[in-house]
Amino acid sequence: MFERKDKESFSKKCITFKNTGMNKAQASEQSIHRAQVSWEQSKGDLEMAKSFIKTNPSTSCLLSNQSAINAFSSILQAQGHFQLPAYSSTEMLNLCGSVALEVEETRQQCEVLDSALNRDLLGHTRPKNIQFTPTFAKTLYEASRQIHKIIKAYWLQNKDRFFAP
């Protein structure tokens, strides 16, 4: 599943997970700080997504997706992961499954968010003929909000180890 590689720039061993491009070092104060920054950014993205639902639904959809991706990234970063692929919420959920099983219940919301994306297996975008209406934007916002609720519960459960949300 993964292979070990020594990294000259790190004093610790890093692990590169095959086919993900994701690397892992040991959790540290720096990785926890990066996780907290990602979590805060995801909350900001979610707030902005809500504010754009009626006035700019396409921007709202993008921010809802980005919010979920950043929320999942925060879990992985706290564990020492870096160079995370950020193709989709489902991609990030699949990676999180190795460190936080409780987030698996967000799969349906991830599929809703990913319905706005059209990506090939390498993560390249292709235009998708979707009209980003306020109703669609609200649906994506709600999916991202549910993901946040579950990830916030994860942070609350692990606040002694990492940080309080």
Image (cartoon, rainbow, N blue to C red):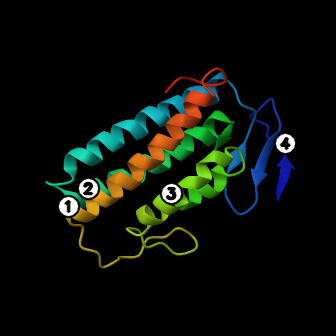
- As measured in the structure, the alpha-carbon distance from the residue carrying label 1 to the one carrying label 2 is 11 Å
Q: Quadrant of residue 57?
A: bottom left
Q: Which residue is mark 1?
A: 134
Q: Which residue is mark 3?
A: 89
Q: Classify mark 2: helix, strand or loop.
A: helix
Q: Amino acid at mark 4?
A: Asp
Of marks 4 and 1, which one's residue comes earlier in the chain? 4
Q: Amino acid at mark 3?
A: Ser
- As measured in the structure, the alpha-carbon distance from the residue carrying label 4 to the one carrying label 2 is 41 Å
Residue lying at 37% horizontally and 68% vertically, measured from the top left: 116
Residue lying at 26% horizontally and 46% vertically, measured from the top left: 50
Of marks 4 and 3, which one's residue comes earlier in the chain? 4
- Whole-percent x and y of residue 109? 46, 59
* Rendered view: 139 above or below 4: below
The nearer-to-camera label among 3 and 2 is 3
Q: Quadrant of residue 7?
A: top right
Q: Quadrant of residue 19?
A: bottom right
In this rendering, would 98 be left or right of 113?
right
Of marks 3 and 2, which one's residue comes earlier in the chain? 2
Q: Classify mark 1: helix, strand or loop.
A: helix
Residue lying at 35% horizontally and 76% vertically, measured from the top left: 127
Q: Amino acid at mark 2?
A: Thr
Q: Which residue is mark 2?
A: 59
Of marks 4 and 2, which one's residue comes earlier in the chain? 4
Q: Classify mark 3: helix, strand or loop.
A: helix
